[in-house]
Image: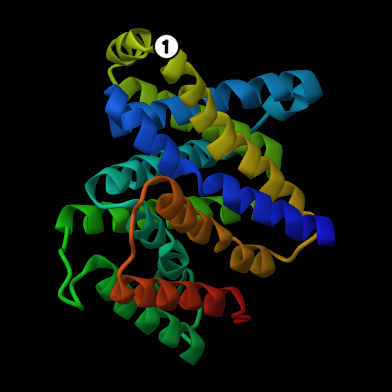
């Protein structure tokens, strides 16, 4: 059990490094779409090689599973693209906390389309999220408000919630988590590469390969492959709700990294908003209905 908690923390910290990679790749001329392609492409290659070496039976899937996996991959693609874009339009703490509104959207979608009940606890969580978003974005508190950064951050949260919903459907239907992860990464990488002007990406990387190549490998392995690996290990020993609550390590890590390495500062209203959003997430993770 202690190892499972450690695995969740490691996954959260690794996910939290995404903002650092975006910060260092942007000055080299890479766009958000190209960074998404790097993340998806490297992840897809690493996972495919791993499955080839471990158990090739994971390649065998049904047509229904393939469709679900593609939907999951497109959701991951949207999450990464909008998240990286939100970082460039605002800052790391704002982008990562807005992305973590995903559990709220999952709950709202489940109530609207899957017949789940709206409870008092869920209602409180929604209220906390809206107030928190207003504080984080600067709408409340007299801060500079970036509509673009706010919208992009919320879109990353919506895409992330879609990924969670597709994953739930996949697991309920008995799909292999290994197959789901591999095919999702392949779908994500394929979509991003098709949209990113690959020749321009290669040209950009070739101008400064000693900096670009380690960062390209890092954004795929460190921010995607390794955290998903540790998170999957943790889920074998921890309830999903506990794992979800512990995953708030990611926004906390991203915020700390941005303050230490990127000299970003957080205002008091923004800090209060982050606390409210994270509190809402914890409330939802403990909801039993």
Image side of residue 247 versus residue 276, left or right = right
Residue 25 visible (yes or no): yes
Label 1 packing within 10 angstroms: few (<14), some (14-19), many (20+): some
Image side of residue 232 versus residue 148, left or right = right
User: The C terminus appears in which quarter of the rendering?
Assistant: bottom right
Residue found at x 34% / y 21%: 194
In the image, 130 versus 270, the foreground residue is 270
Image side of residue 250 versus residue 147, left or right = right
Q: Residue furthest bottom?
A: 120
Residue found at x 36% / y 47%: 83
Residue found at x 45% / y 32%: 188
Number of numbered tags placed on the structure image? 1
User: The N terminus appears in which quarter of the rendering?
Assistant: bottom right
Residue 200: give x, y in percent of width and height. Answer: 27, 13
- The residue pinned by badge 1 equals 209
Residue found at x 50% / y 72%: 281
Residue 235 visible (yes or no): no
In the image, residue 68 above or below residue 169:
above
Residue 209: give x, y in percent of width and height. Answer: 42, 11
Label 1's element? helix
């Amino acid at each position: 059990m202690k190892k499972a908690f450690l695995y969740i923390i490691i996954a959260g910290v690794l996910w939290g490094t995404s903002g650092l990679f975006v910060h260092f790749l942007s000055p080299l001329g890479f766009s958000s779409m190209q960074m998404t392609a790097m993340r998806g492409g490297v992840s897809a290659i690493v996972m495919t090689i791993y499955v080839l070496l471990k158990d090739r039976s994971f390649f065998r899937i049904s047509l229904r599973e393939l469709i679900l996996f593609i939907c999951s991959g497109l959701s991951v693609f949207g999450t990464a693209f909008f998240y990286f874009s939100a970082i460039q339009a605002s800052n790391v703490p704002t982008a990562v906390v807005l992305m973590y509104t995903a559990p709220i959207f999952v709950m709202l979608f489940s109530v609207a389309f899957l017949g789940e009940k709206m409870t008092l606890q869920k209602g409180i969580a929604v209220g906390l999220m809206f107030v928190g978003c207003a504080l984080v974005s600067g709408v409340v508190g007299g801060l500079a408000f970036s509509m673009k950064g706010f919208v992009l951050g919320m879109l990353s949260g919506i895409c992330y919630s879609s990924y969670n919903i597709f994953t739930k459907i996949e697991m309920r239907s008995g799909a292999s988590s290994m197959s789901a992860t591999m095919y999702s990464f392949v779908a994500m990488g394929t979509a991003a590469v098709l949209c990113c002007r690959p020749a321009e990406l290669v040209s950009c990387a070739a101008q400064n390969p000693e900096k670009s190549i380690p960062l390209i490998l890092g954004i795929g392995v460190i921010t995607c492959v390794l955290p998903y690996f540790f998170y999957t290990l943790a889920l074998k020993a921890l309830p999903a709700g506990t794992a979800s609550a512990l995953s708030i390590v990611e926004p906390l890590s991203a915020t700390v990294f941005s303050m230490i390495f990127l000299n970003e500062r957080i205002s008091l209203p923004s800090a209060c908003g982050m606390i409210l959003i994270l509190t809402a997430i914890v409330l939802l993770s403990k909801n039993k209905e």
